[in-house]
Image (spheres, coloured by chain):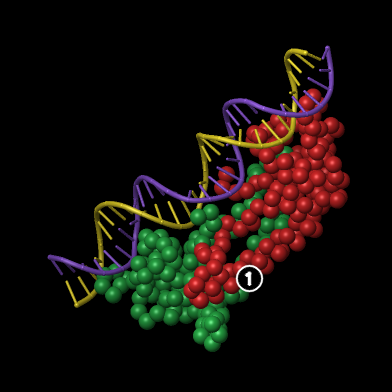
Chain colours: A green, B red, C yellow, D purple
Amino acid sequence: MHLDGRLSRMLHLLLHMAHAEGPITSGEAAEMLNTNPVVVRRTMAGLRDAGLVRSEKGHAGGWTLIRPLDSMTMMDVYEAVGKPRIFAIGLADPAPECLVEQAVNASMTGALHAAEAMLIAHLREVTLAEIARDFEKRAASHVAKP
Amino acid sequence: MHLDGRLSRMLHLLLHMAHAEGPITSGEAAEMLNTNPVVVRRTMAGLRDAGLVRSEKGHAGGWTLIRPLDSMTMMDVYEAVGKPRIFAIGLADPAPECLVEQAVNASMTGALHAAEAMLIAHLREVTLAEIARDFEKRAASHVAKP
DNA sequence: CGCATATGTAACATTGTAAGTTGCGTGATG
DNA sequence: CATCACGCAACTTACAATGTTACATATGCG
């Protein structure tokens, strides 16, 4: 893909794991994400190293959530997947000699830093528990109305 | 490149054009940007269509700025280059059936929209004239100190 | 007019990164 | 010990910006 869906996918998966009884296998997770088990393991490896989930081999193995939803923010997951690059736009040359370009870079980085700070502030604010509550609301109205 | 440098490059070029006497050719511009004349023309085409610059063929032809620097903001240039995608991260599936993923998408788009709004606010605030003034300051201290 | 110059564009190659795929190794469990 | 599931390396695919080549078109000077 042309855009990084790892944060989105891992949030999705963590919430499913929170609702599951036992562990979830990479194959099951891959179906939920419409992808491949290897992609799941590759990305989940970061969450395991960050201490958000645990993996177990063999029969009845799979992935288990080991932290409560209200102790995790979107930022924790973003960091666990390796803090991927946020922006698709950026500087043509990060360290130019040309003073004009240096001035341009200063204005660009000013705007980008402000946006990045806003994004990170939001990621830090929202816990997975809040997203789970939003899901519950959607599920309730989905049963009631459609 | 893996990241979109069109806004950065066009800002750089517009400021050079503002300081130039006559038109600047694609070849000259390409040297300033360390790239190819065709890339310059391709990107500048958007600025021409947006009415920021004018192009002339033949002898003594090239690119000319046709709007004052204090009448252009970074946002004008961003729009002129086609409003490229801002983020490198995003949703795995923009319209999922899964209610869990819908909740995840809602939280993701909330964070991304807030960041985008902040970025755009900055782009609207900064005029090219302000960047030019920043350059003048840099040029002055560059002569004085090193 | 005729040639040099410069833009306008199409067509194709390159590149960087996430994602997808294949294959094999390792550990756990019934 | 056979099966299941993760671990991981190596390779392929997909996509968009960038880079490159080639050629057409318009301008202006001599």
Q: Is residue A133 visible?
A: no
Q: Is residue A47 left or right of residue B102?
A: left
Q: Nearer the viewer, residue A143 or B28?
A: A143
Position of residue B90 in the picture relative to residue A19 (left or right): right
Q: Residue at x 63, y 65 (%)?
A: B112
- Badge 1: how crowded within 10 Å, few (<14), some, or many (20+)? some
Q: Indicate the quadrant where residue D8 lies.
A: bottom left
Q: Is the C terminus of chain A in the top left, top right, bottom left or bottom right quadrant? A: bottom right
Where residue A97 sits, quadrant-wise, is: top right
Q: Is residue B141 above or below residue A70?
A: above
The residue tagged 1 is B110
Q: Is residue A57 visible?
A: yes
Q: How far across and down, in percent of the image, does residue B110 sit?
A: 63, 70
Left or right, A23 with respect to A117, comes to: left
Of the pair A90 and C28, the residue shown nearer to us: A90
Query: Residue A18 in the image: x percent, y percent?
Result: 44, 79
The structure residue drawn at horizontal position 52% and vertical position 58%, both measured from the top left corner, is A4
* Residue A66 position in % (x across, y down): 42, 77
- Count the marks: how many? 1
Percent coordinates x, y for residue D12 in the rendering: 38, 46
Residue at left offset 77%, top offset 42%: B48
Element marked by disc 1 = helix
Front residue of A97/C19: it is C19
**Horizontal side, residue A76 vs residue A100: left or right:** left
Q: What amino acid type should be assigned to the residue bearing mark 1?
A: Gly
Residue A69 vertical placement versus B108 (above, below): below
Mark 1 falls within which chain? Answer: B
Q: Residue at x 56, y 62 (%)?
A: B90
